[in-house]
Each structure stands twice: as structure tokens, then as C-alpha cells.
Image (tube, rainbow, N blue to C red):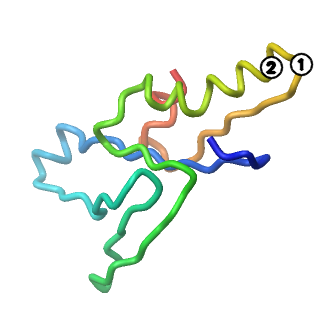
Amino acid sequence: MSNSNVTVCVRFRPLSHKERKANDKVCFKKLDSESFVFKDERDEDVIFSFDKVFYDDAEQSDVYNFLAVPIVADAVNGINGTIISYGQTGAGKTYSME
């Protein structure tokens, strides 16, 4: 995790059964653990970078170990910490926070 006060990550969830059945496609391409390419409505590539990108194959433990473990360790030592999950309804926020 970065040594800054704020760490920003993104997590992609796998397509749902309903989305797969509708033949929906993902609109991003994996680059590395910190960046991805998003194909916009004009079919142009836009690169986004974060402190960490968790792709659709990431496990809960990957997210927990990267984000929560350092915050929990700090909290045990009396340092405040907060994790915020933000996104559209049904995007997987509750799943990621469990």
C-alpha cells in the first residue's frame, strides 16, 4: 500500500449470470496491478491508474490483505483508519466489504 494518507483502489466484479446470459461484454482491458484501459462510448481507449486494481479474478483475501490488514494494524496501535466503498447499486460494494 502507498505511504500516503489516502489509498484509492478499484475492484471489478465478474459479469453476473444475467449479464452473461444477455451476452454483455466487459469494457475494460487489464494492463497491470495499477492500471486498466477503459473503452469509452466512442470506442477510444482511456487509461486509468490507481494505487491498486483488483480485477474480476481477485479473491476477497487479496482485497483484505492489501487494504484492511494495514488499517487494522494501525487501529490496534491507536491510529484512526477508514475504508470507504463507493459505487453504483449492485456493483458489489457489500460483497467487497464482507
- Residue 37 is situated, as x and y percent measured from the top left of the image, at 35, 68
Label 2 sits on what residue type?
Ala
Q: Between residues 3 and 21, which one lies in front from this camera angle? A: 3
In the displayed image of the protein, which residue is found farthest to the right? 78
- Residue 30 is situated, as x and y percent measured from the top left of the image, at 30, 58
Residue shown at 66% from the left, 39% from the top: 84
> Marks 2 and 1: in contact by CB < 8 Å?
yes
Residue shown at 31% from the left, 86% from the top: 42
- Please tell me whether mark 2 sits on a helix, a strand or a loop: helix
> In terms of image quadrants, where is residue 85?
top right
- Find disc 2 in the rendering and name its residue: 75
In the displayed image of the protein, which residue is found farthest to the top? 76
Label 1 sits on what residue type?
Gly
Tell whether 37 sits left or right of 2. left
Residue shown at 45% from the left, 49% from the top: 53
Mark 1 surroundings within 10 Å by alpha-carbon count, few (fewer than 14), some (14 through 19), many (20 or more): few
> In terms of image quadrants, where is residue 90?
top left
Q: How many marks?
A: 2
Q: Is residue 45 above or below residue 4?
A: below
Cα distance between the residues tagged 1 and 2 = 5 Å
Tell whether 10 sits left or right of 4. left
Mark 2 surroundings within 10 Å by alpha-carbon count, few (fewer than 14), some (14 through 19), many (20 or more): few
Label at residue 8: none
Q: Is residue 83 above or below residue 98?
A: below
Tell whether 71 sits left or right of 30. right
- Find disc 1 in the rendering and name its residue: 78
- Please tell me whether mark 1 sits on a helix, a strand or a loop: loop
Residue shown at 51% from the left, 48% from the top: 52
